[in-house]
Each structure stands twice: as C-alpha cells, then as structure tokens.
Image (cartoon, rainbow, N blue to C red):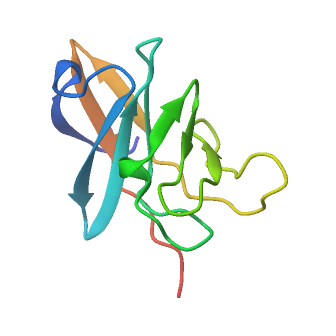
Amino acid sequence: MTPMIDIGPVDAIPLRGSRSVTLDGENIAVFRTGDDRIFALVNRCPHKHGPLSEGIIHGHAVACPLHNWRISLETGEALGADRGCTPTVAVRVEAGRILLAAPIRAAA
C-alpha cells in the first residue's frame, strides 16, 4: 500500500477552489469541486506547463490559466480537441483530512 501524506483539512480548500503543495520536490494541485469531491494533479498543464492550481474549476475539469485548455480532474487528460495528459495523484479523504500519495516521477 502506498503511504499517504496528510496535507490538511478539506475545509482549507473552498468549494470550486484549489491549493498547491510540494511533495518530494513535485508541485501538486489539489482541487475541491462544487460537489465536494477532492482531486489532485501534478500542477502543470500538458500544453505550456501553466499552473493548473490557478485555473477555474468547471464541474470535474479545470481550465488552464494560460491558454484555457480544459483538463479532466479525474484522468488528467486534455478535453475537447486538445491533446495531452497531466499526471494524476492518488488522493483520499479520511475524517475530513486530505491524504495524498507521493507522486511517481516520470523518467527524464
């Protein structure tokens, strides 16, 4: 089982909001959707590496603040005509706390 890291309470992130944290040197965006679900992605758009944590959440997608690419919070895949993928990070909520798995880095 992958060790999980407690990053704080769910209530620290507003509905339809996000925050970023750094785990093992990787910047992670953590999102809270309007239906109160929590998702986590590596905090960079696959297009021009825009900071997804600064984007606007629409349902279960986030719009990159640089060029408006929409990224699925569930899969990390670009939506619509755009192509690319942002790595997802395993997340769960226990007793109102957000737990993240340390991201696995891709080989350079």
Looking at the picture, tell me which residue is in the foreground, 28 or 51.
51
With 107 as the anchor, is 22 left or right in this view? left
Q: Residue 87 location, x and y as percent?
A: 55, 57
Looking at the picture, tell me which residue is in the foreground, 14 or 66.
66
With 73 as the anchor, is 29 left or right in this view? left
Which residue is drawn at the image coordinates 60% and 53% (left, top)? 68
- As drawn, 106 above or below 50: below
Placement of the N terminus among the 4 image quadrants: top left
Which residue is drawn at the image coordinates 58% and 28% (left, top)? 60
Q: Residue 71 location, x and y as percent?
A: 62, 47
With 55 as the anchor, is 84 left or right in this view? right
Count of numbered circles on the image = 0
- As drawn, 36 above or below 81: above
Q: Quadrant of residue 22?
A: bottom left
With 2 as the anchor, is 19 left or right in this view? left
- As drawn, 38 above or below 29: above
Which residue is drawn at the image coordinates 45% and 47% (left, top)? 89
Looking at the picture, tell me which residue is in the foreground, 96 or 20.
20
- As drawn, 71 above or below 7: below
Looking at the picture, tell me which residue is in the foreground, 67 or 89.
67
Q: Residue 93 location, x and y as percent?
A: 32, 21
Q: Residue 10 location, x and y as percent?
A: 23, 22
Going by the picture, which residue comes out furthest to the right? 81
